[in-house]
Structures are given as C-alpha cells and as structure tokens.
Image (tube, grey):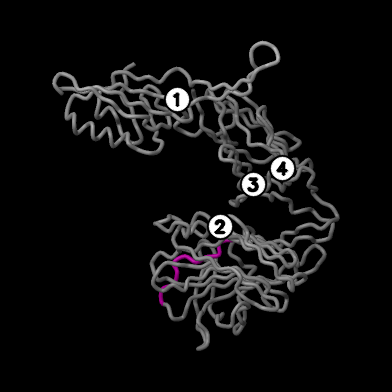
C-alpha cells in the first residue's frame, strides 16, 4: 500500500519522513476472563477488547538532526491525537506515542531509520464525521424513522461500523408528555413517569406565563412613578426597561434620590389566576434566562427577578449585580423576605462570555451568550435558587404559607458609574403554580416544544438545557447501537398519540 498522507493531529508526518511499513493489524486483541467449571474446561465470565498498537517504520534522508527534533515534538504530546491514513481518510484513530522512538543511523549518518509505536487505548478507530439520522433524511443510508398512530416511533438504524456505538439522541416533544422509553436489543432507558396522567383531580401544576408566547414581554407593565423596589429602598425605579432584540434591556436609567445608589427601570406582572380563579401561589416555580457579559473592565449594572406577595412585600429574589468599577467581577445574589428580609446567597463570577480567559471556577458558565438557564422554586417555606448545575436551598419557616402573587423585573445602573454593562438582559421567562387542587389537563413533565437530549456515551440527560439525570427511572441503563442494522423503539405516555421529532447522531467505530 502506498500512502499519500499520514496525519498526526494537524501535522503531515510524510513531510518529514519516508514511510516504509505500517502495521495496523486486522483487529484488536481480546482479553478474556474465565472461571473453572464443575465439568472439564472453564466458563467464560467476560470478554473485553484490549488496547491496540499501530507501528510506523520510517526513513529520514535529509536534515536528519533537525527532522528528528521536529518528529520528537510532534509525537511527544501527553494526550490523545488523531491519526489518519490516506487509504482510509474517513476514519481516525485516537493515539498516543508508546515508548521510545528508536532509530538507527546508516552509511555514516547519511540516512536514518526508525519505528514509531502508537498506542490506541480504546482499541478501535472511528469515523471522522458524525452520522446523523433525523426527520429530514429519514429513508437514507443511515436509517428510517417511522411514527406510529399510537404515538410511538420505530427507528431503523444502519450503523455501518463494525462495533457498537453510543449515540446522542435528541427528542423534541410535539405534544406535552410525561414519559419516554427507549428500547433496543441492548437495553432499556426510561425517563419521567410511565403512569403520569394527562388530567385528574389532584394537586397539579399549572403554567401561568411563558415569554415564548409573549416575546416582547408586553404582559409586564411599567411600574408607576414612585413605586419602591421590593428588595431595597436604595434602588430607584423611575427609569425604563424595554424589549430590545434579544430580551429586556435598560433603555433609560432615570434618576435616583440622594439617598439611593442605583437608578433603573422596573416592570411588574400580577400572576394570572389559576384554573380555580385564584391569584397567588404558595408552591411556585419560575424558569428564566439571563445574559450578563461585560465587554470591558469597569462596566457595572444590576439585574433582579423579584417575587412578592399581593401587597408587594418581598418573598424572594434572584439577582446579578456588578458593582466592580475597575475589574470584571460580578455576583449572583439570592434574597428572601419574611420576618428578616436579607441576602442569603452570594457567588462571585467573572462577567465574561464563558470563554474562560483564565477565570477558572469563576468562569461565567451560567449567564453567557450560549446558555443563561436558571430558575427559582418555592415549595412552602423551602426556597431554591439555581446556580451552576444545582439548586441552592434555603428554608424560611415564616414563608411556609405566603403566596407569591407578583413578579417584578428590574435592570439598573450604579449612579456613580458611567460605564453600563454591554449585555445585562432578561431573555425569556416562564412560571407555574404547583399543587393546584383541581381537575385539569396536567402541564406534564415534558411540555410541547421541550427538548430532551440523551448522551449515551457520557451518561448525561439534558432537559431544555438543564442537567436532568434525575429523570431516569430506576433500573434504566444507557444503551448502545449495535453494528449493522438494528431497531430502536421510542414510547411516550399512553395518552399521547402525537409522535415526537427524533434526531440521532453517532460515530461509527471500527476494529
């Protein structure tokens, strides 16, 4: 076999050497574990693929010393690199140099030969590109998606690799739904609750507002002049916020009194009545998407999502403040009302766009341009504030029976600063009331348009951008797609006969 190219990472090895021989083998070795059986011989307990080696014999003809140093640099990487051969350009091996690269100098140093040994820890190669099967290309070489009248879906998948592979599966719920079951010959994975009802007389949840249906936040109204900020009387509210391009932004900070330190605008909405005609929720959940990115050091600003009772008394609040007038440190805040209104949560973060820049654990992984997902939950006296992958809990006993009846949205600026944050935005918001004791069409676990993503290889469940491995039903396992043609069946709640939209992507793997 004559090779036109052998690439290691982004580097072409044949620019520096002549390849004499390549030893890739036919397959990967097997490691078998047996145990003695009662009769003759032994019983097979388990069998695993071993790691694999790839060896390249090479010759260097020119600039021998310089070239050897270059090769040493290219191969002396302490992490896996992609190795691609020109005779199989759509497949890559994840390799690392194994052992010393020994060479022999010939004919008084006029040319050098040697061998590079690469270890393939996984023992297999994989396709360079990701294979995708979705609603648009159903019926192609990758497989076929068939939706059934009962709401279930049959997916015929053609994995053209020689090994099983662990896919990523995206399920978009076209109708509200409470359960997802994924079944193939390698296992079963279940999400949600199989017997979740579509409607019943019970303590149920009701969605009261979703900005997806109110894209300019027109249901939130400007507060009247002189309306106090529910969280602090140091905050003025006679400015204006309005929808601009991607969400609510500060339009005009307005003015602040001499005893106030922040000026800005505020909007308010009284919760819509539930199906019983009642306004107010003791048990309440709100999702909101916030964007906080200062594009220059010293920019400042304040953002608040505040929840009050019907008399405008603070129950709880979630905020982002950046008082840092020289650097780039912002703070996530959590406030509570009750007998002793106070701040209960404070976490610093870099007001960057999540790109890192040495920020380490302070990196803005929650409120950057690509994410922004967060939420708040009140269950009686238990208050939960979402922060970087989990909900921080605080128990305020005197708020056990207090109803949230209004939502205030505030964006403002420190009056002693002239550099406002480039991006301080409320991009979308929804909220619901829990434990409404009525017969109703349940706002089920998976709402219409919600997206469930299952990463089989890394064992992750993502629901609308939030980590949701707690959705897994006990006994479930992350499943693989076998080599060749196979069937994956996807089931929903029995009462949901509207099939979801399916997208499956995978890497083909080869011995």
Query: Of callouts 2 and 1, which one flags the residue occurring earlier in the amino acid sequence?
Result: 1
Q: Nearer the viewer, residue 50 or 271?
A: 50
Q: Secondary structure at mark 4?
A: loop
Q: Please give the residue where the numbered disc 4 appears in the rendered image.
A: 473
The location of residue 374, given as percent across then percent down, is 59, 59
Q: Nearer the viewer, residue 99 or 401?
A: 99
In the image, residue 316 sits, relative to residue 504, either above or below, namely below
> Magenta includes 426?
yes
Spatial CA span between label 2 and label 1: 39 Å
The location of residue 454, given as percent across then percent down, is 61, 41
At label 3, counting other C-alpha atoms closer than 10 Å, the crowd grade (few under 14, some 14-19, many 20 or more) is: some
Query: Of callouts 1 and 4, which one flags the residue occurring earlier in the amino acid sequence?
Result: 1
Spatial CA span between label 2 and label 3: 15 Å
> Magenta includes 102?
no
Q: Please give the residue where the numbered disc 2 appears in the rendered image.
A: 388
Q: Secondary structure at mark 3?
A: helix
In the image, residue 36 sits, relative to residue 499, either above or below, namely above
Q: Which segment is the magenta one? A: 418-428
- Quadrant of the image occupied by residue 183: top right
Rendered residue at 79%/53% (across/down):
441
């Amino acid at each position: 076999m004559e090779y036109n190219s052998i690439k290691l990472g982004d580097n072409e090895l044949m620019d520096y050497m002549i390849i004499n021989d390549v030893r890739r083998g036919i397959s990967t070795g097997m490691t078998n574990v047996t145990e003695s059986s009662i009769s003759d011989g032994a019983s097979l307990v388990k069998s695993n693929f071993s790691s694999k080696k790839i060896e390249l014999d090479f010759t260097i003809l020119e600039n021998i010393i310089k070239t050897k140093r270059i090769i040493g640099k290219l191969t002396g990487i302490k992490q896996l690199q992609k190795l691609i051969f020109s005779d199989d350009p759509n497949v890559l091996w994840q390799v690392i140099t194994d052992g010393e690269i020994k060479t022999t100098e010939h004919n008084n140093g006029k040319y050098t030969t040697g061998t590079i040994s690469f270890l393939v820890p996984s023992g297999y190669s994989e396709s360079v590109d990701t294979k995708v099967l979705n609603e648009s290309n159903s019926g192609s070489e990758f497989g076929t998606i068939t939706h059934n009248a009962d709401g279930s879906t049959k997916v015929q998948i053609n994995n053209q690799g020689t090994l099983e592979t662990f896919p990523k599966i995206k399920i978009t719920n076209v109708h509200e739904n409470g359960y997802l079951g994924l079944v193939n010959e390698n296992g079963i994975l279940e999400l949600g609750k199989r017997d979740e009802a579509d409607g019943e007389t019970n303590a149920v949840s009701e969605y009261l507002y979703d900005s997806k249906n109110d894209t300019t936040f027109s249901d939130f109204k400007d507060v009247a002049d002189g309306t106090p900020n529910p969280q602090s009387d140091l905050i003025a509210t006679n400015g204006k916020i309005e929808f601009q391009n991607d969400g609510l932004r500060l339009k005009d900070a307005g003015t602040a009194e001499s005893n106030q330190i922040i000026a800005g605008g505020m909007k308010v909405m009284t919760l819509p009545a539930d199906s019983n005609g009642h306004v107010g929720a003791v048990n309440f959940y709100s999702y909101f998407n916030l964007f906080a990115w200062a594009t220059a050091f010293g920019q400042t600003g304040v953002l608040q999502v505040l929840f009050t009772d019907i008399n405008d008394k603070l129950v709880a609040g979630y905020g982002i403040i950046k008082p840092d007038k020289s650097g780039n440190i912002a703070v996530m805040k959590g406030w509570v009302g009750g007998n002793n209104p106070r701040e209960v949560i404070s976490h610093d973060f870099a007001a960057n766009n999540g790109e890192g820049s040495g920020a380490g654990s302070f990196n803005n992984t929650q409120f950057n341009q690509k994410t922004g997902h967060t939420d708040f939950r009140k269950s009686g006296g238990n208050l939960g504030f979402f922060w970087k992958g989990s909900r921080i809990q605080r128990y305020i006993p005197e708020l056990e029976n207090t109803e949230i009846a209004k939502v205030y949205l505030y964006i403002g600026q420190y009056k002693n600063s002239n550099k406002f944050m480039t991006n301080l935005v409320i991009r979308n918001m929804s909220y619901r009331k829990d434990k409404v004791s009525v017969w109703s069409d349940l706002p089920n676990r998976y709402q219409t348009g919600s997206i469930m993503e299952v990463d089989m290889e890394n064992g992750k469940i993502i629901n609308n951008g939030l980590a949701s491995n707690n959705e897994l039903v006990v006994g479930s396992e992350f499943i693989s797609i076998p080599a060749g043609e196979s069937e994956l069946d996807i089931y929903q709640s029995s009462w949901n006969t509207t099939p979801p939209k399916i997208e499956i992507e995978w890497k083909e793997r080869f011995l």
